[in-house]
Image (cartoon, rainbow, N blue to C red):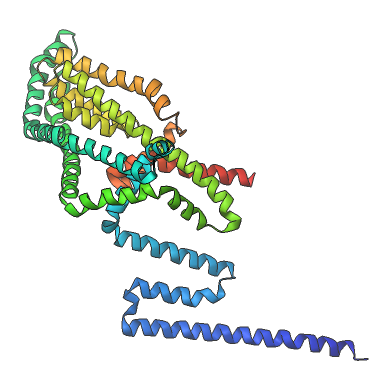
Amino acid sequence: MPAVSDIQEFKSMPEQHENTVRTHEVIISVTALVLFGVLFTVTELFKSPFIVFAVLIFVLYPFRRSKLIKILISLSVIIFLLWLLHTISQLLIPFVIAFLLAYILNPLVEKLSTKNMPRSIASILIILGFLAIIVTASIFIMPIIIAQFSDILKTLPQIFTDFQIWVNTILIPKLNSLGIPTQDIQAKLANELPSRLELIFGGLLGGLAGIFSGLSVILSQLINIILIPFLTFYLLKDFDDIKGLVIKLFPENNKKKAVEYFHKIDSLLGRYFRGALTVALINGTLVTIFLSLIGVKYSIFLGAFSGLLDLIPYFGLLIGLCFGITVALFSGDPGIQVPLTFLTYIGLNILETSFLAPKIIGGKIGLHPALLILSLLVFSYFFGFIGLLIALPTMSIIIMFVKEWLDKRQ
């Protein structure tokens, strides 16, 4: 019988051979990577993200069983996709707008489809109705809003001059009659407050001017005006198929969880976007009506402005209220119009939070006020005005995933 040492030596021979092969693979891989680096430098192919990404995946893919390699491949794919989206972002604008419109209008199409109407016919009817509303608003309402906005820009210096006159002739004598020392107050109101208010409102109006100019540029692009309705129609017509295709992209072992997440996100975003837009439209309409009744100038612009800001929690009400009161101060009778303007904004906010939002949106999304304000500040810092609009739903989705992760850990 063979000795035990001979048997052990025989078993160790394949292991030594395997270790030698692995060492050779590592040496060859490192040498190949160095040669790739030299080739990139000489041919300047490293300037093309497509080439770098393709070579990186080609080199790493054979070793994909390693956990570290899987992480590197995943990070490479994410970085490349982010770069690609950033590069072609301008080309994707009509597709993004069309998808958002299809997402918002899809429930209406589904309701018509349940009444034995083909989905394609229902999609055409909904799009035609939506276009009719947009065209009507563009013809009758938008010119008035733009005209009033232009008047505000022209009269802004005069408003601050009138404000200083009001301070000196009405506010200061009133404070003196009450025995309140007004020298420091008068100096600050006369010297510091107007310049700071002008800076704040100038920046705010400048941002609005950028929004309106951006909208006019988009509307002036005829190809987008033609393309967006067609894209919206095809997305609406095949919306269920698109959802099914997205679900099929997930592996079978994760498909059930993916469907669960998909329904949760769809319910959250659908309820928020459609409900928030409806509430904002109601808010803008009521602000316009009430401010017109009490004789405040530029009521249509203020209503549209309030409806837009209504999509921003807390800050929207504060900015709209300050802007409305500022205009009401110089609309003819501030003693009556300013308190009524204040009551209009506060009363509509109470109506919205206590009745409209619960009925239309279907309850609160469920973010702590401190977390909500933090998310608004962070998103506005990185994404500007658009960040304020997407902060609430995006943070809600993030919190949903964090809660799921915590539940799994427990």
Which quadrant of the figure contains the C terminus?
Answer: top right
- Say whether residue 251 is left or right of residue 331: right
**Residue 206 image offset from top left, x and y in percent:** 16, 41
**Residue 293 image offset from top left, x and y in percent:** 17, 16
Which quadrant of the figure contains the N terminus?
Answer: bottom right
Query: Residue at horizontal 28%, vertical 45%?
Result: 384
**Can you say whether 275 is above or below 352 in the image?**
below
**Can you say whether 31 is above or below 59 in the image?**
below
Q: Nearer the viewer, residue 362 or 165?
A: 362
**Residue 111 image offset from top left, x and y in percent:** 41, 36
Q: Quadrant of residue 183?
A: top left
The residue furthest right is: 1
- Say whether residue 130 is left or right of residue 369: left
Query: Residue at horizontal 41%, vertical 24%?
Result: 359
- Residue 324 visible in rendering: yes
**Can you say whether 291 is above or below 157 in the image?**
above
- Residue 377 visible in rendering: no
**Residue 373 image offset from top left, x and y in percent:** 38, 36
Query: Residue at horizontal 42%, vertical 83%?
Result: 36
Query: Residue at horizontal 80%, vertical 89%?
Result: 10
Q: Quadrant of residue 45?
A: bottom left
Counting the numbered discs, the total is: 0
The residue furthest front is: 116
